[in-house]
Amino acid sequence: MSIPAPARLSPEERRDELLRAAMKVFAEKGYQQTSVADILEGAGVARGTFYRYFDSKKDCFSQALDKFIARIRGPIRELDMSRPLAEPELIELYRRVAGLMVSDPLDREFSRVVLAEASGSEREFRRKLLKFYEEVTEMTAGFLRAAMESGRARKLDPETTARCILGMVKEVVLTWAERSDDRQELLPMVMTVMEFAFYGLLPR
């Protein structure tokens, strides 16, 4: 009885496979220290295969960053943004995003490079991250604005307050990615930030 040949990957599946391999190498060595040769070795492919999908190391990292942001952005895009979020919805959103990062070990490893390196390296990478941060800030500020207008939160600048919350979340994610031995620890860390933020916003 003949053994069936393994199914051939589609170009999109092959690209995703290469991206995951590249993300792992970037996570281990950092963007600046990674070479195309390192990616070829990590992915187990020839140079021609790499350049069939990516123009350069920069292009490869840019596509990896797009993939990472799209995954984190998923829960946000599922929301009805035509109205301000209620408090439980916003907390649940942050919890779901943290849960996504916990579910895939590669997200933790790659997030360290994104937060520690990508934001301070190539302008294109900074632009992608800033666009995502602005989206999260706008969503959070919309909730805060509605909460302040209804008297559920103290009157503060909603945009600045939203940036403070995002900044705290980014800091605990970076701490988790750099130091924590427990992959599951991110969830309670993010929930602590959210509870701290909302407790501090209670009317006086």
Image (cartoon, rainbow, N blue to C red):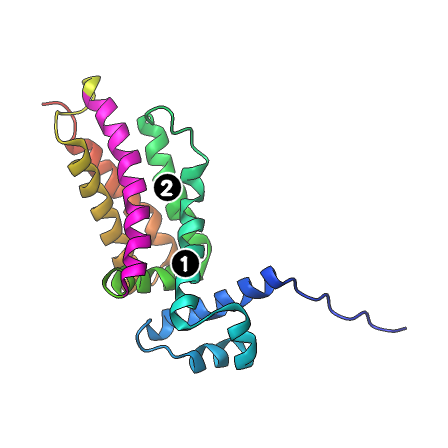
- Residue 68: percent from left, percent from top: 42, 55
Q: Quadrant of residue 64?
A: bottom left
Q: Where does the N terminus fall, quadrant-wise?
A: bottom right
In the foreground, 179 or 82 = 82
Q: Amino acid at mark 2?
A: Arg
Answer whether residue 143 is magenta in the image.
yes
Is 131 above or below relative to 81? below
Secondary structure predominantly adopted by residues drawn in magenta: helix
- Residue 199: percent from left, percent from top: 18, 32
**Badge 1 vs badge 2, beta-carbon distance below 8 Å:** no
At x 44% / y 82%, what residue is drawn? 37
Q: Is residue 93 rendered to the left or right of residue 201?
A: right
- Residue 20: percent from left, percent from top: 49, 65
Is 116 above or below relative to 137? below
Indicate the secondary structure of the residue bearing disc 1.
helix
Magenta part of the protein: which range? 122-148
Most extreme residue toward the right is 1
Is residue 163 in view? yes
Is residue 180 in view? no
The residue beneath circle 2 is 95
Please state the total of marks drawn on the protein image: 2
Most extreme residue toward the top is 150
Q: Amino acid at mark 1?
A: Asp
Indicate the secondary structure of the residue bearing disc 2.
helix
Q: Quadrant of residue 142?
A: top left
Task: Specify which label sits upstream in the sequence, 1 or 2.
Answer: 2
Q: Quadrant of residue 123?
A: bottom left
Q: Which mark is residue 107?
A: 1
Mark-to-mark CA distance, 1 and 2: 15 Å
- Residue 164: percent from left, percent from top: 18, 42
